[in-house]
Image (spheres, grey):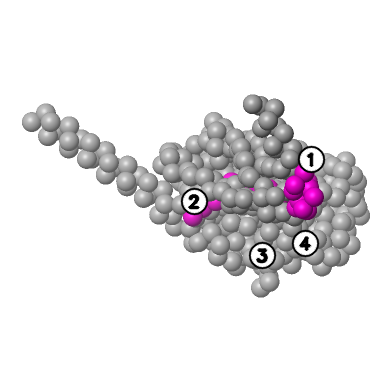
């Protein structure tokens, strides 16, 4: 009887855990992703590569261009065309001067379209030129599914991205301390030149989800509700992106659910024990007998327990080297994989020329080797 009761309890625990995980995965938003902020590895994917409008999440790229171009104390003259654009505004006024930092906060906390436009005019001269800078940066980040028309995110047929690409943009954005600090600020007072104003962060999870570091909200009729959220639990920092949610509660709840799912199932694992590499390759009739290669590396990755147990090493090195080989030529590759997913790779190149022995060198080598053998005897 006791044995049957224990078995029943264990079965119910398995079922409950299954439904807990399933619930975390069955979100209502049409597109979402969670990545590791350390490496960019995808931990959760729900139509993550689907192209969609992304509304004010756009401003994360605008913030990147600002931080790459301007000092935060740089004064920026407010272009009259930046004001009264519509949608969410911080309330800046024409012909005033505002620092880059205060425009950054006005853009990221209350999602001021006017602040984004002021930045665009200041850096690009025109919005078209600034959008070109944004698109160039997207290409540098390896994003081929993203195109920007403006710095604020108001709807346009050719203004789009994907949940995954917005996560990668965010990964780069939070490498700037100024952006990380801004998106983590719940409320602050800034000087907008002719007046001061209290700015409140529109990311509700800063107050309701303790693991939240910061993020960015977005909404337009075309994009619906969108959300970037950066969260951390112990040493694992994650970035979630949700696009196209039908209402405000959905975007916040879905973001929290997928982050919690990942925190429950993933740990930041040290892979250094796999990365102590020693290679000894014989050289056929070359100026050296063997090519010795010793290499150590460090890497951490977000993995489940099961994934960690499935890691295997794949090497692509020749069994024998046939000279000549020039410095800089491809030598081989060392990889760590889980199934078909490559979680680490290092490509090696010849660090020096390896010459093929001519006949004189070859016979000289034979004589030297014979002399060495005689000396041993």
Numbered tag placed on residue 144 in the rendering = 3
Q: Which residues are magenta?
A: 340-364
* Mark nearer the N terminus (1 vs 2): 2
Q: Which residue is mark 2?
A: 44
95 up-or-down from 186: above or below: below
Point 66% across, 36% down: residue: 294
Q: CA distance from mark 3 to mark 2?
A: 20 Å
Point 78% across, 53% down: residue: 358
Q: Label 2: state its secondary structure.
A: strand
* Tag 4 and tag 2, C-beta contact below 8 Å: no
3 up-or-down from 280: above or below: above
Position in image of residue 125 (x %, y %):
89, 62
Q: CA distance from mark 1 to mark 4?
A: 31 Å
Position in image of residue 152 (x %, y %):
73, 59
Q: Is residue 110 visible?
A: no
Q: For residue 55, which quarter of the picture?
A: bottom right
Numbered tag placed on residue 136 in the rendering = 4
Q: Label 4: state its secondary structure.
A: helix
Q: Which residue is mark 1?
A: 190
* Mark nearer the N terminus (3 vs 1): 3
Position in image of residue 301 (x %, y %):
56, 40
* Tag 1 and tag 2, C-beta contact below 8 Å: no
123 up-or-down from 50: above or below: above
Q: Label 3: state its secondary structure.
A: loop
Decide: few, some or many residues near mark 4? Use Cα within 10 Å; few <14, some 14-19, many ≥20: some
Tell how many labels. Answer: 4
Q: Nearer the viewer, residue 96 or 279?
A: 279
Q: Nearer the viewer, residue 304 or 16?
A: 304
The quadrant of the rendering that contains the C terminus is top right
* Mark nearer the N terminus (4 vs 3): 4
Q: Is residue 347 magenta?
A: yes
Decide: few, some or many residues near mark 1? Use Cα within 10 Å; few <14, some 14-19, many ≥20: some
């Amino acid at each position: 009887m006791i044995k049957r009761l224990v078995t029943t309890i264990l079965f119910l625990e398995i079922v409950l855990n299954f439904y807990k995980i399933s619930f975390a995965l069955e979100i209502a938003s049409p597109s979402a992703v969670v990545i590791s902020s350390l490496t960019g590895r995808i931990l959760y994917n729900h139509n993550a590569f689907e192209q969609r409008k992304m509304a004010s999440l756009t401003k994360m790229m605008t913030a990147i261009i600002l931080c790459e171009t301007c000092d935060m104390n740089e004064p920026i003259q407010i272009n009259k065309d930046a004001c009264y654009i519509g949608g969410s505004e911080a309330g800046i006024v024409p012909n005033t001067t505002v620092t880059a930092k205060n425009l950054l906060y006005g853009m990221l906390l209350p999602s001021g379209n006017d602040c984004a436009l002021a930045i665009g005019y200041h850096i690009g001269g025109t919005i078209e030129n600034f959008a070109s800078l944004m698109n160039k940066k997207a290409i540098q980040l390896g994003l081929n599914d993203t195109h920007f028309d403006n710095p604020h995110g108001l709807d346009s047929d050719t203004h789009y991205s994907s949940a995954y690409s917005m996560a990668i943009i965010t990964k780069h954005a939070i490498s700037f301390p100024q952006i990380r600090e801004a998106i983590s600020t719940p409320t602050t007072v800034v000087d907008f030149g002719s007046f001061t104003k209290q700015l409140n962060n529109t990311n509700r999870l800063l107050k309701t989800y303790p693991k939240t570091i910061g993020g960015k909200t977005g909404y337009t009729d075309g994009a619906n509700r969108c959300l970037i959220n950066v969260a951390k639990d112990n040493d694992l920092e994650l970035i979630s992106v949700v696009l196209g949610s039908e209402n405000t509660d959905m975007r916040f709840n879905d973001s929290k659910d997928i982050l919690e799912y990942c925190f429950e199932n993933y740990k930041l694992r040290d892979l250094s024990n796999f990365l102590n590499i020693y290679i000894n390759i014989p050289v056929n009739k070359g100026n050296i007998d063997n090519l010795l290669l010793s290499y150590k590396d460090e890497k951490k990755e977000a993995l489940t327990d099961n994934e960690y147990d499935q890691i295997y090493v794949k090497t692509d090195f020749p069994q024998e080297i046939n000279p000549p080989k020039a410095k800089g030529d491809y030598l081989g590759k060392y990889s760590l994989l889980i199934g078909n997913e490559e979680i680490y790779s290092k490509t090696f190149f010849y660090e020096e020329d390896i010459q093929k022995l001519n006949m004189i060198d070859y016979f000289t080598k034979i004589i030297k080797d014979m002399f060495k053998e005689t000396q041993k005897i």
